[in-house]
Image (tube, grey):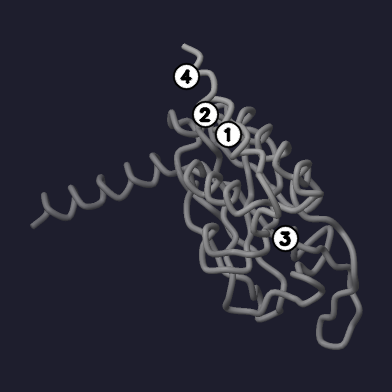
Amino acid sequence: MKKSILSLVITVALAGIANAGSVVFSNFGAPFTQVQADGVAIPAGSGFVAVGTTADTAGDLGLLQADLQANNGSMSIAARDLLASKFIQFGDAVQFGFNNFDGFFQGNAQDDGGAADFNGRDIIMVAGNGATLAESTGLLIVQGDTFGPDAPVFSRNIGLGDTVLFGAAGGTGDVAGTPVGAFQMGNVIPEPGVSILALFSAGLLVLRRRR
């Protein structure tokens, strides 16, 4: 019995060491700004907020910016789905509704920041009005610092004060009858014509035919 208990303690301790890195993400501090989609706060108990990265941060974010430019600041469904397939989540996601306030969130994702999937890559926070990234029609994307190994402890923060890649400040929020600042998610739309991703695919097809 003593050996079993000792083994359990050691296992838990090692697991704690392996997941010692943390990224705190919140909009409940500075700036205290309510997140909305089309002027409506994301209801408490809905949506998602997660932190993570992509396998090719610079290339994936560059492709995202090209898509936004091609769609007048909105994101195509194809780009959203591509981002969803490439996003590598760090720790657990949270829903909106911190302290039961619509449009507010706070979380502490814990994992190994020195792992191959994360080390040296940009920390990306993604929030949506759907249950998952792939189900959201409104998204907020923020870029922060980079992941890294414990030295001796890896700890970072990310929030609306960092580099916003999709979404923008605007509108007025409300917390228990008190006006506060607001931040609007960017819109995900069906491609109005040929998306930047479709053009990219077509270009590859032409190159293959020429060969």
Q: Which mark is residue 187?
A: 3
* Mark with earlier residue (2, 1): 2
* Mark with earlier residue (3, 4): 3
Label 1 secondary element: loop
* Mark with earlier residue (4, 1): 1
Question: Residue at position x 21%, y 52% from top?
Answer: 8
Q: Is residue 169 left or right of residue 106?
A: right
Q: Amino acid at mark 2?
A: Asn
Q: Are marks 2 and 1 in contact (CB under 8 Å)?
A: yes
Residue 187 placed where, x, y %? 72, 60
Question: Residue at position x 55%, y 58% from top?
Answer: 133
Residue 65 placed where, x, y %? 73, 38
Q: Which residue is mark 4?
A: 208
Q: Is residue 26 left or right of residue 177?
A: left
Q: Which residue is mark 2?
A: 119
* Mark with earlier residue (4, 2): 2
Spatial separation of the CA atoms under disc 4 and disc 1: 38 Å
Q: Is the residue marked by circle 3 packed among few (<14), some (14-19), or many (20+) residues within 10 Å?
A: many
